[in-house]
Amino acid sequence: MKHFINLKDIPAKNLRKIITDAKKRKSLRKKLGTLELDKHAPLKGKLLIQMFEKSSLRTRLSFYLAIKQLGGTALTLRPDELHIGKRSEPISDTAKILGTYADLFMLRTDSEKKLELFKKNLDIPLINGLSPNSHPAQILSDIFTIEEIKKKSISKLNISWIGDSNNVLNSLIEASVKFSFNLKIACPKEFMPKKKLIEWVRKNDGKVYIFNNPLDAIKNSDVLLTDKVISMNDKVNKSYKIKKFKNFKINDQILKNAKKDLIILHCLPRGDEITDKVFNSVRSKVWIQALNRVHVQKSILLYCLDKLR
């Protein structure tokens, strides 16, 4: 049984297989409608149960369409509808029931502890749809998008991140080691990535470089990624944090230091970390980035059920 929880725990060859499969599946859907099935419907009869403890648009839609296009179906649950939401049933019992009814379980959670408890007690694959420390499906899809647009392996590209050290960046850092690409990060000193993660990068010969000036991070980069400065349920002094990120807002001035063919990705939803002009420019590839999540999500589901071609 294969879970999909953190990129650092999945062999690089398997991550590459997921992306390769997603590329093939996307190419075969050019003439198919949204709800038309992939050839052979490889997950016919399979049920994906999704549970969201945090708001979701793209993750919810993309996993729903992913399982449907593969021939299966999805059921979405809210924790406040379940006994677990009322704290009257332990996670271990809920996990046993989910495993009895479903073939896959995707959890978007506000707690790493809950993620671990479900993993421990589930006898079906667990997929991390977002947790406080990780957003692996998002980053794997971003790599798919980058290679599709740049038409080369991400290992041959320079990637930059300007913004907060959040769960999306954590997964990007893990991906930089797994896919062996240069990653330059720009953030204020008070909001740098966790030391434990950087130590893991060093132990695994990663190529991650951290700057406190966005102009240094974007120099010679092929791709720029960012995210909201104030994330969901961010328990910080928001006015202080916004002030610290004032000089990290992605605008025309910062982009003067970038390559002309630089592309910009944003996992959405967006905030004040990027100007409207830049967000809506030709460099911005956010809409194709969002759509590509369906294709990669399908290959993640197949990976978890040992059905990758």
Image: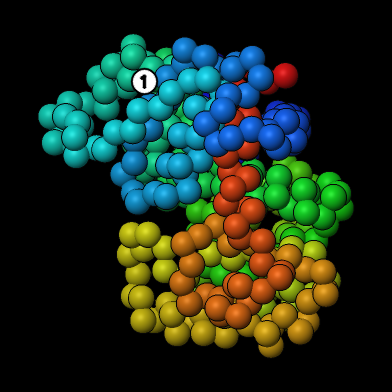
Graded by Cα atoms within 10 Å as few (under 14), some (14 to 19) or many (20 or more), the crowding at tag 1 reads some
Q: Which residue is drawn at 35% across and 28% down?
A: 75
Which residue in the rendered view is the most extreme toward the bottom? 253
Q: Which residue is drawn at 48% across and 20% down?
A: 72
Look at the picture and state if 297 lies above or below 153: above
As rendered, which of 176 and 21 lies closer to the eye? 21
Look at the picture and state if 211 lies above or below 297: below
Q: Position of residue 309 (x, y in %)?
A: 72, 19
Look at the picture and state if 251 lies above or below 36: below
Q: Where is residue 8 in the image (x, y as percent from the top left)?
A: 62, 39
* In the displayed structure image, the side of residue 208 where residue 124 appears, left or right: left
As rendered, which of 309 and 281 lies closer to the eye? 281
Q: According to the image, label 1 marks what residue? A: 121
Tell me where residue 195 sits by quadrant. bottom right
Residue 171 visible in the shown view? no
Q: Which residue is drawn at 70% across and 37% down?
A: 30
Tell me where residue 26 sits by quadrant. top right
Q: Residue at x 48, y 48 (%)?
A: 58
* In the displayed structure image, the side of residue 39 where residue 94 appears, left or right: left
Q: Where is residue 207 in the image (x, y as percent from the top left)?
A: 77, 56
